[in-house]
Image: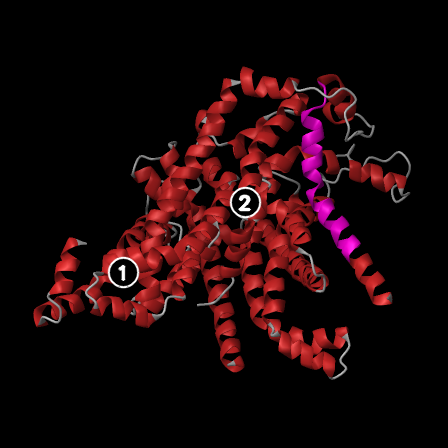
Amino acid sequence: MQKTRRQKQSKRHPSIWQNKFRESRYAWAGFLLPSFLGVCIFVLVPFLDVVRRSFLTAVTEEWSGVRNYQTVFSNQAFILAVKNTVRFTAVCLPLLIGIGLFLAVQLSRLKKMQMIKSMFLFPMAMPAATVVLIWKMFFARQGFLNGGLLAAGLLPEGSFFDFMGTKAAFWVLVFSYLWKNLGYTIVLWLAGIFSVSADLTEAAKVDGASERQCFWRVIFPNLKGSLYTITVLSFLNSFKVFREAYLVAGSYPHESMYLLQHLFNNWFVNLELDKMAAAAVCVGAVLFAAILVLQKLWDQDGQSQE
Amino acid sequence: MRKNIQKGITKTALFLLGAAFCIPVLFLLSGSVMSRYELTESLMPLMADREELIRWDFIPMYPTFEHYIRVLFQTPQFFVVFWNSVKIVICILAGQLLIAVPAAWAFAVYPFRFRKILFTLYIVLMLMPFQVTMLSNYLVLDGLGLMDTHGAVILPAVFSTYPVFLIYRGFCGLPKGLIEAARIDGAGEWTIFRHLGLPLASGGILSAVVLGFLEYWSLIEQPLAFLKDQTLWPLSLYLPEISIEQAGYSFVASIITLIPAVFVFLSGREYLEQGIIASAMKE
């Protein structure tokens, strides 16, 4: 601080100019270094080690070529987990994005919606651990869902349907994911809707467009950018559904909701690190490719709009 | 006129749906003041796995604070777990800010080589789920002898790239001309960061803190994998261990876990939304 003041007084001295230039040229390294070193130590370098290990046997560390990959791809649990994870994503994303858009459009028409928006966001603040008991009260054989369905006559008299122990477990998980994630999807859609300029929608209304036309013809085409980001974020948040799944149903839930996350966790507990390494490389590569493709699409879209 | 009625109906419907989203809190609140007798009575079918439906009254017949007293005054274990959670969250958030704010500044202000590639790398890492980096983390933590310590949960989280991205957004608004002007006036790079950068970053920092708090307060995956010793566990792992026979205790512990999260949620609502929106913006 003192030094800079002194420099200030002796303004425009050539050597100081040079120093300044050099300082600002390499200053970024000083700011970035702590973070980048940490990332290297905790993620990048060990990930290279993981890649190496994926070609070795677990205990003796001998070269085994692609055998680990073969083992993983012929592993029943892995196939089941991939299937379920893909199915879960394929069901949840369209539901979440669609319902979120519908609710956001309804909300955008109201004047005072801050409170309602916050109510939808609230599940984000509820730690998974605090809802475990309540999920049990809802979805157990003796739970409220069963009671409700019995009262509505949708279940045969005197039947106690076990939602967590049958294929319905998958849908309980879907419900839980929607409950947790609808709030931020709505926030993102709303931000997208409000970023479409009011002049544009106003002009469309003056020209006699109905509210429905106004939405589909004017606002909706401008929401592509939001769609990409919401897709990416929702997809990555879908991995966190493991929290509820694990807490409610444990390490080995009904097979319809046995996800990749369970598998990684179980392999870790059993110290099957060779399989884990190969699977981590595969899953990482698939996600990496997916992220890059989405970003490319997104960039192209941004350019075409500009 | 018809339009107004329609709007009223939409609003009521949305309100009711929103309220339904918050119902779990009502269960927790009513359960936490319900007497042990009434709880057993209501949840008996679940406890004994009988073929009978459970019942629930949102207004307990004989409200009592016995469970609160038990948790707060008779269960030292609860405090250990509670402080574990507090310690983990505070260390992670403080560390993240210390590391992420300068890094975000570097990305926002300096047009250095490899900037674009590095930033893309940071985004990809921010989006990777824990399961992919789990083994990498384990190898380092094991090598450093940090397994089964709080450091195993804290350190990898400190270097998360998500806050870098959130805070970066705040810095982007700074006009380049202003920085040039400060340099010509002889301000050093650190001074520029301290006096021009930091005040601008407050929005992004708060967003990162609010989102981070909610995330790390309910952390499951990392402590589950890296902490074997149950006395080191955070609340989020300890709560589900309480058996249903102790439902009252479980409800109260849940309420106490919920209080800090709700406090942060309500006071940081604005920043929470800004943070959510910022994480969806492209560079």
Chain letter of the residue carrying label 2: B
Q: Label 2 is placed on what type of residue?
A: Ser
Find the distance from the CA under tag 2 to the CA under tag 1.
Answer: 30 Å
Quadrant position of residue B161: bottom left
Residue A115 horizontal/vertical position (percent) = 67, 51
Q: Which residues are magenta?
A: B11-35
SS type, badge 1: helix
Describe residue B157's horizontal placement relative to residue A304 as left or right.
left
Same chain check for tags 2 and 1: yes
Chain letter of the residue carrying label 1: B
The local crowd at label 2, few if under 14, some if 14 to 19, many if 20 or more residues have their Cα within 10 Å, is: few
Q: Label 1 is placed on what type of residue?
A: Ile
Residue B245 horizontal/vertical position (percent) = 67, 21
Prevalent SS, magenta region: helix
Coloring basis for residues: secondary structure
Q: Nearer the viewer, residue A282 or A16?
A: A16
Q: Nearer the viewer, residue B89 or B273?
A: B273
Disc assigned to residue B192: 1
Q: Quadrant of the N terminus of chain B?
A: bottom right
Residue tagged 2? B267
Disc assigned to residue A299: none
Q: Nearer the viewer, residue B150 or A239?
A: B150
Q: Is residue B122 above or below residue B65?
A: below
